[in-house]
Image (spheres, rainbow, N blue to C red):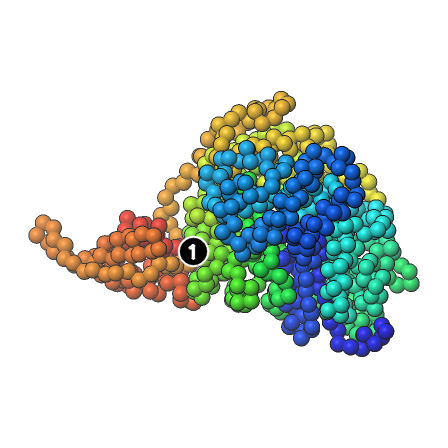
Amino acid sequence: MSSKIISLKTKLFLVTPPFTQLNTPYPATAYIKGFLNTKNRSSVQADLGIEVILALFSKKGLQDLFEFSSSKFPQEELSENAQRIFALQDEYIKTIDSVIAFLQGKNPTLALQICQEDFLPEASRFAQLEELDWAFGTMGTQDKAKHLATLYLEDISDFIVECVDPNFGFSRYAERLGRSANSFDELYQALQQEPTYIDAILLSILAAKIETIQPTIFLISVPFPGNLYAAFRSAQWLKKHHPEIKILMGGGFANTELRSLSDERVFEFFDFISLDDGELPLELIIENIESGINAEFKRTFLLENGKVVYKNNSSRHDYKQAQVGTPDYSDLLLDKYISVIEIVNPMHRMWSDGRWNKLTMAHGCYWGKCTFCDISLDYIKIYEPIAAGILCDRMEEMVAQTGQTGFHFVDEAAPPALMRELALEILRRKLAVTWWTNIRFEKSFTKELCLLLKASGCIAVSGGLEVASDRLLQLIDKGVTVEQVAKVTRNFTEAGVMVHAYLMYGYPTQTIQETIDSLEMVRQLFEAGVLQSGFWHQFAMTAHSPVGMYPEKFGVTKETDLIGTFANNDLNYIDSTGIDHEQFSFGLKKSLFNFMHGICLDYDLQEWFDFKIPKTTIRPDFIFDALEEETNFSSKPNAKVLWLGGKPTIRSFTKTKKGNSWEMMELTFHDKKEKVVIQANQKEGEWLVKTLDIISVSNSKTTQFQELKANFESEMDDFELFWYSKPMSLLKDFGLLVL
């Protein structure tokens, strides 16, 4: 039977296993499908996570769930919260389908019912509402209803965890089994048990799809530890019921965790595991399967003679980013994803509410120096930008396919020069899109560039401030200072772009004083209104980062040099300072929660901690002073000059003063909100009207500052006097950019 299938045309089934995210598909399979399209290879993809969720959170799903739980536990053994949910099961069964439809955007009128707060059954999650009254004053009906519906789903999730499957989680199913799993033993043991209730739902969906699709190759992308268990469970079922199908694993988890894989038992589940860019490894695996000869491979683990071998014997180069095609989201249930809402953190809220098309501007990171990052790995180390024209082509294709105009560029750090070119191309093509991305807070993000990005549809950026201490930023090799970060966040904020900062505590050699000073810097950034969102995370040492590779340089010691047979990335270490950084977690996060909502900014920092902390050494006006700036009356000769506005209305008139008369011109400009009126003498006005047409963003050719100056002074005197005049300054605020 096996040889018969191989002789048929290869058909691939690409799968993201449960659970990654509810609101939008993870893009890995869409990228691979897009590449396979360029090779005329047949493929089908599925996000099994959303399909399991929809099966579970349905009328029939809940009926079966409550019936199962009643047979598993006597009621008296349940917590009071679980007893309440069980007692209200009819209310949950009655409301679940309409709530899911509402969160899918199909039933907006239900918001009115939900907001009356007598429609949804309420359990322990709704206790949070008392703390969140402040938010509801600024929320519309739809948002408030989304939040209440989210709490309702989380209540059901709590019931599932207690009564059905302790490993359940909307985005981190059985994550414990995948995190820091140096040994395969625990995961292997879990897979020898009978499938769980959630497993059974997953496997029934998988069985139906295999029957319909009848693939010859099954590819599982595992982005996170929370996908790992379900990936192995799916592969196990396939091996048992369809041994003729070849099974591959790739994705972010394999790239970072499985680079030293040696446990043979893993290949009871998978035939191949590939690392880093998946296009060429996959193509070679397909060729080997079709030929029946294991010849050339690229970055691929497989089993030979009972031993795990790593093969990277192909001389072929990886595909350039321009060659891999446009991500293809067909087959995915795009209208079935669920928008939940988190009101605490503005960036997390944006990320989880609505569906985003995922793209990258560049492969890898253009900076590639941060010492906590896995910069030794190819997916970060090899930097390759994609031309703005190709990016816009892909955006237009994806809008046509998905009907969605929102884009999340998932770059490690998007390059400022490419962001500028992308923004220009979006404006030239007159695309109405919304987008956001990750950046480095570097000085390239001037006021003018931020305005350009905003004009093209950029609504938010996130970047790593990490530690708000210049000593530590230098040790991290971040290439920025706190003062610089403050100015960049100001430029984005004033342009109307939301700023989210990733914050880190517990970096090697970080002192208690530096942690407190970092908090004070963050407080001042929120107080100044230049930061809108943030998230604190504790430093983790990874094997492929400079800290992990050369710990002695950073004042830490690895607990062991032993390399496990399975996952090897997260490393336990001893910090020479001996500080328990974990103790700061609650205070840092609680203070940030309040700062994000503009409250408690005047609190003494001590109030956030129940143990003694040192006074901050940061001046209370440090950020305020950093944001003070003098007017710059100079421009680089090669700076690009752009006009983002429309054509003005022109009125000529004669001005008379002290018996002298001269011709003047009044120019009126309109944008979507307001108008601005400037006056100039006739000759200067005529030059300006002609020039605005030349430097319009719709022109493909850009004009440099020195060209403008030369053109002006061929007809008139003293360009600088004209350029830095009050009317021109007014026009610059309105849409005249010098980049």
Coordinates of residue 278 in the picture (x, y in percent):
70, 63
In the rendered view, would you say 678 is above or below 291?
Answer: above
* Residue 640 visible, this angle: yes
The residue sitting at the right extreme is 305
- Give the image quarter of residue 511: top right
- Give the image quarter of residue 410: bottom right
Residue pictured at 68% horizontal, 62% vertical: 46
The residue sitting at the top extreme is 612
Quarter the N terminus occupies = bottom right
Viewer-nearest residue: 681 or 456: 456
Coordinates of residue 718 in the picture (x, y in percent):
28, 55
Disc 1 crowd, CA 10 A, few/some/many (<14, 14-19, 20+): some
* Residue 173 visible, this angle: no
In the picture, measured across the screen, residue 251 lies left or right of residue 416, that is: right
Residue pictured at 63% horizontal, 36% vertical: 124
- Residue picked out by circle 1: 455
Viewer-nearest residue: 40 or 727: 40
Q: Amino acid at mark 1?
A: Ala
In the picture, measured across the screen, residue 14 lies left or right of residue 602, that is: right
Viewer-nearest residue: 360 or 703: 360
Coordinates of residue 256 in the picture (x, y in percent):
73, 52
In the rendered view, would you say 571 is above or below 590?
Answer: below
Q: How many marks?
A: 1
Residue pictured at 52% horizontal, 57% vertical: 406
Residue pictured at 85% horizontal, 61% vertical: 240
Secondary structure found at label 1: helix
The residue sitting at the left extreme is 659
Coordinates of residue 27 in the picture (x, y in percent):
63, 59
Quarter the C terminus occupies = bottom left
